[in-house]
Image (tube, rainbow, N blue to C red):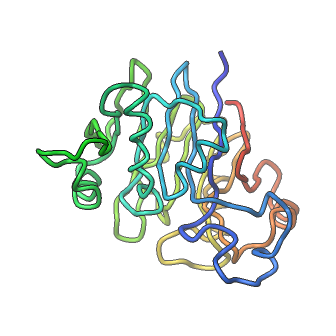
Amino acid sequence: MSNRVTFLGTGTSQGVPVICCDCPVCQSEDAHDKRLRSSVLVEYDGLKILVDAGPDFRQQMLRAGSPRPDAILLTHHHIDHTGGLDDVRALNHLCNRDFPIYCERNVEESLQKQFYYAFSSRKYPGAPGFDIRTITSNPFEIEGREIVPIRAMHYKLPILGFRFGDFAYVTDANYIPESEFVKLEGVKLFVVNTVRRGKHISHFSLEEAVSVCLKVGAERSFLTHISHLLPTHRELSAELPTGILPAYDGLSVEF
């Protein structure tokens, strides 16, 4: 049984193309430059685990052939990573139960406000059902499979990346504490975010992301959360160091 990650979305909070933008990247006809909001589906020792469910969640799942996830992990509470959770209703219907969602306490508090109707004591029939399972930066298990959270910072907001065996995924970060790199030792496949060249307040720049990839030293690294401020997929691929590539929607990689 092979483990694999499928990139359901690889774009920033606005996606690519950006509404009303006429830049060369947004006008590109290359399918690699059509990016929904960032999310991955991880197939890990027989489980299907979705990391983040942004506004494109429904479209992403349908496009991927409607794989049936066993759980959802949330990296943080920003809308481009949680905005599609209303569509968990379909999974509730399939499973006939509230759906397992793993997140930190502050993320749950945000969901209680954003999806207040899902937490109501007198829930409207058909409202989504969330089975919230609180996690911290300590390792935890889903049905016996260990997952190691990676603490990172998104400007001033503490967020989580995740390690699944030989694969680690970190998005929406601009800083990883030195102590957390220990958790990344020995990974064979690594994914990290970038949005543009030059310093950004809450995301790794392209230069910083490449530096992080080289420091982690995985056999293969991919960049995600890519904006239209970076070159096209073809141009960006040509300039990156060996072993580092921009991810794209629909890409599936074994680990």
Furthest-top residue in view?
1
- Relative to residue 125, is residue 4 drawn left or right? right
Q: Residue at x 69, y 47 (%)?
A: 221
Q: Position of residue 32 (x, y in %)?
A: 79, 58
Locate the C terminus by quadrant.
top right
Q: Position of residue 180 (x, y in %)?
A: 43, 48
Looking at the image, residue 59 lies above or below residue 28? above
Q: Quadrant of residue 88?
A: top left
- Relative to residue 54, is residue 188 drawn left or right? right
Q: Position of residue 56 (x, y in %)?
A: 55, 56
Q: In terms of depth relative to the viewer, which is nearer, 215 or 191? A: 191
Locate the N terminus by quadrant.
top right
Furthest-left residue in view?
121
Q: In terms of depth relative to the viewer, which is nearer, 163 or 33? A: 33
Q: Position of residue 129 (x, y in %)?
A: 29, 39
Q: In terms of depth relative to the viewer, which is nearer, 35 or 5? A: 35
Q: Residue at x 75, y 52 (%)?
A: 244
Q: Quadrant of residue 194?
A: bottom right
Looking at the image, residue 74 lies above or below residue 209? above
Q: Residue at x 38, y 55 (%)?
A: 76
Looking at the image, residue 144 lies above or below residue 168? above
Q: Residue at x 35, y 70 (%)?
A: 156
